[in-house]
Image (cartoon, rainbow, N blue to C red):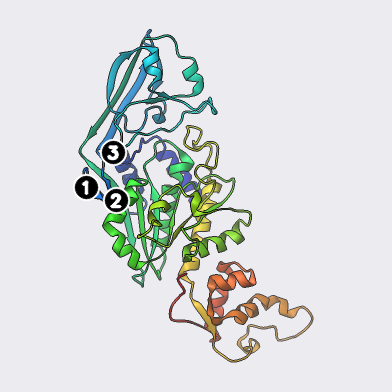
Amino acid sequence: MDNHGQDMYRLAKRLFPICRSITGDGVRDTLSILGEIVPLKTYEVPTGTPVFDWTVPQEWNIRGGFIEDENSKRILDFAWNNLSIVGYSEPVDQIVSREELLEHIYSEPAQPDAIPYVTSYYKRRYGFCMTENQRNALGNGPFHIVIDSELKDGALTYGEIILSGESQQEIFLSTYICHPSMANDNLSGPCLLIYLAKMLSELPRRRYTYRIVFIPETIGSITYLSKNYVHLKKHVVAGFNISCVGDDRTYSYVASRYGNTLADKAAKNVLSFHAPGYQAYSFLQRGSDERQYCAPGIDLPLCAICRSKYGEYPEYHTSLDDLTLISEAGLGGALEVYWKCLMGLEHNYCYRVTCLGEPQLGKRGLYPTLSRKGSANEIRTMTNFIAYADGTNDLFDISNIIHVPVDRLIEIADILRAGGILERMPEARTG
């Protein structure tokens, strides 16, 4: 995990300069780079395609933009920070007064040194984003303003990886790739998920099939669901929406709509051992693509694990969410949490002891042959596991009851099964 922390951070640095949006070449460039780590298939959905209650918008690409004062001194440039242009701005090249310019400038008074992240996907306009201090320092004008952008009929692009398993049941993993240069809110998700995909691809066997998608937030998940929701509703047993997993301040959990899915159970169990002080949020505090995946009629069994949750940390949606906010340790810790969730799911069967009464562990080499005070403590976890392996409890249930992490119980279950003491029930519980 430590090496992958370095790898993920290095990838985030490479992706950081790219200007991404819900469509366009920034998305394609990002997917191309992710595909160097694990091959993925890209899909293009044309402008105007109906997707449930929405329509795929025009494609937007931007080459540059700036503001110059009356002395041709550049006071803002897209090349300096790609948050400086409102996302989906239409093109403009004009000389404007100070008053007119101010109508098209967005800043964050409460954070005077931060450039805010602002978009206008579904209404045609243009705009510039700058710090409050820059806004207050504007001269009298006039100003030359340029946005070299293009809105055209094109496509929405997303990427998908399918890793086949022994079962047609699926684990669904999703992240978004539609924000410009912000590190925790955007880049941490794709960087973690592509390395999670790499680790899954290297497993000698997979119980489940893994469906892994890299999409633009909201319109991308709606588009993906419009094409796949019938299959997903039939096959997905658990899923996670992965975002804001890069800092090292905290852990957060965002529940599914009712908080009662197998994914919720896995997330709460793993976090209770890995980060017992984690912050829990209900579905009422949702904000990312769990909105779409858990929507009525879709109802996928999906929740989210974050580090500092979107909307809950001060740098969110500003230029302060830069590469100094995330860390190798933060990314690596989140990767470990997700890996424990997935491995718990891979081994999450209901277990039943195969004999009546307490099994004799000694004859199987599993119990100290010399009985003395304290000798039973060494195998207390094993005997507690056996005590609750009655065919009604799955691995997460037993972990919660006896207060032992699932990854430790996986090892014990393998030992007991090898000794003929334990058997798997035919089907894992899914809720």
Of labels 1 and 3, the one closer to you = 1
Q: Which residue is mark 2?
A: 223
Q: Amino acid at mark 2?
A: Thr
For residue 49, the mark is: 1
Of labels 3 and 2, the one closer to you = 2
Residue drawn at point x = 42 percent, y = 35 percent: 181
| Circle nearer the N terminus (2, 1) | 1
Residue 267 at x, y = what percent? Answer: 52, 60
Q: Please indicate, yes or no, whether residue 2 appears anywhere in the rendered image.
A: no
Q: Are marks 1 and 3 in contact (CB under 8 Å)?
A: no
Q: Which residue is mark 3?
A: 25
Badge 1: residue crowd in 10 Å (few <14, some 14–19, many ≥20) = some
User: How far apart are the two marked residues, 3 and 2, measured between alpha carbons?
Assistant: 18 Å
Badge 2: residue crowd in 10 Å (few <14, some 14–19, many ≥20) = many
For residue 313, above or below residue 253? above
Task: Kindly state the secondary structure of the residue where label 2 is placed.
Answer: helix
For residue 239, the mark is: none
Q: Locate residue 363 relative to residue 318 in the image: left or right.
A: right
Q: Locate residue 385 relative to residue 241 in the image: left or right.
A: right
For residue 298, above or below residue 76? below
Q: Amino acid at mark 3?
A: Asp
Q: Are marks 2 and 1 in contact (CB under 8 Å)?
A: yes
For residue 284, above or below residue 356? above
Residue 26: name its quadrant.
Answer: top left
The residue most toward the right is 373
| Circle nearer the N terminus (1, 3) | 3
